Amino acid sequence: MPYLRQILSEKGKNVFTAPPSMSVFEAIGSMAERNVGALLIIENDELVGIFSERDYLRKIALKFRSSRKTQLSEVMSSPVLCANLDDEVNHCMGLMTKHHYRHLPVLEDGELCGIVSIGDLVGFLLREKEVELDQLNQYIAGGY
């Protein structure tokens, strides 16, 4: 079974964060600059929320709120559902599907160590299946 540890070893453990006092406008600028769909909200070295493109659409754009005047603390999603580094990929996909989340922070010994998106999980599983298919084809063709 594949684990999140494998995905983060390939993807890297870069996590983009913001303080809860940051304006939504600054946050979406940061997200666009980094080409990410979510920021983790950190206060006093603790994960207190997550802000995603979906949060922006539902809590700012559709409610005609000012992104320049609204702080992340007002619209972030909290509490944050997290996974552990040694959780299975299929388990995490199930959690994300059940809760309609696209991003899942990853902890190791209670400390933030990365983030995965649903795209990361699907891509990893697709690559794993391609390798498995290649191995089966080689076996059938007598390559072993």
Image (tube, rainbow, N blue to C red):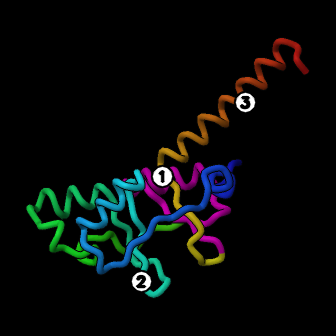
Q: Nearer the viewer, residue 58 or 53?
A: 53
Which residue is disc 1 drawn over? Answer: 117
Of labels 2 and 3, earlier in sequence is 2
Query: Amino acid under label 3?
Result: Glu
Whether the magenta-drawn stretch holds residue 87 is answered as yes
x, y percent for residue 136: 77, 22
In this rendering, the label closer to the viewer, 1 or 2: 2
Q: Residues within 10 Å of mark 3 (few under 14, many from 20)?
A: few
Q: Residue 134 at x, y = what percent?
A: 74, 23
Rate crowding at label 1 as few (under 14), some (14 to 19) or many (20 or more) other CA atoms within 10 Å: some
Q: Earlier in the sequence, mark 1 or mark 3?
A: 1
36 left or right, relative to 66: right
Residue at the extreme bottom of the image, as rendered: 44
Image point 43% across, 78% down: which residue?
42
Nearest the eye: 58 or 10: 10
- Residue that mark 2 sits on: 43
Q: Could you classify mark 2 by the number of other residues whose Cα lies within 10 Å: few (under 14), some (14-19), or many (20 or more)? A: some
| Residue kind at label 2, given as amino acid type | Glu
Residue at the image point whose x is 60% and y is 51% from the top: 11
Of marks 1 and 3, the one in the foreground:
1
